Image (cartoon, rainbow, N blue to C red):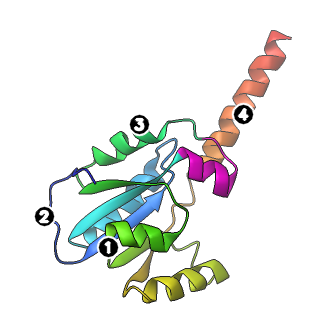
Amino acid sequence: MPAAGGRPRGGTVGYAAGAFDLFHVGHLNVLRRSAQRCDHLVAGVVSDEVLRLTKGITPVISEDERAAIVGALACVDAVYIERDPDRLATWDDVRFDVFFKGDDWLGTPRAAALQRQLATRGARIEYLPYTTETSSTRLRAALADLETMARAARG
């Protein structure tokens, strides 16, 4: 796990995962807020393969480039590329105390199941405000609209 921001590993280890494709202010917000709530923040960058498997999307930006972008942030201490969709496998590799998620997950069956899983390792979930104004899904849709308009203009 390459170091990024430089805070020493120790105290509370936090983990914030995402595709971090088409990096935007929502991504920055969750990483900054996560870093404020732990002593050492590991950012999990979901691999291209896992994104295709779990979300059916191919990222615009490669996993190596996404890891480089996220790792360059001062609030990120290390980057871990998730190559397995199993969060317990991730925990086995990273050994985090707190898993940070957007509050759009709060109260969902998936969140409850994940909390039960992580509790078996002594980890917990903390929810952070989700930035609703910007999302990779919206950016992807806007890019698709632009491509459609460009094709139509070319006739």
Tell me the amino acid under the disc marked 3.
Glu
- Residue drawn at 31 percent across, 61 percent down: 42
Distance between the alpha carbons at the discs numbered 2 and 4: 42 Å
Mark 3 sits on what residue?
Answer: 65
Mark 4 sits on what residue?
Answer: 144
Mark 1 sits on what residue?
Answer: 95
Q: Label 1 crowding class (10 Å Cα cut-off): few <14, some 14-19, many 20+?
A: some
Tell me the amino acid under the disc marked 2.
Pro
Residue lying farthest to the right in this orientation: 155
**Mark 2 or mark 4: whose residue is earlier in sequence:** 2
Tell me the amino acid under the disc marked 1.
Arg
> Taking 14 as reference, is 142 left or right?
right
Q: Quadrant of residue 16?
A: bottom left
Q: Are marks 3 and 1 in contact (CB under 8 Å)?
A: no
Q: Position of residue 80 (x, y in %)?
A: 36, 55
Mark 3 or mark 1: which is in front?
A: 1
Q: Which residues are magenta?
A: 48-58
**Mark 3 or mark 4: whose residue is earlier in sequence:** 3
Q: Are marks 2 and 3 in contact (CB under 8 Å)?
A: no
**Mark 3 or mark 1: whose residue is earlier in sequence:** 3
Q: Is residue 81 magenta?
A: no
Q: Position of residue 132 (x, y in %)?
A: 57, 60
**Mark 2 or mark 3: whose residue is earlier in sequence:** 2
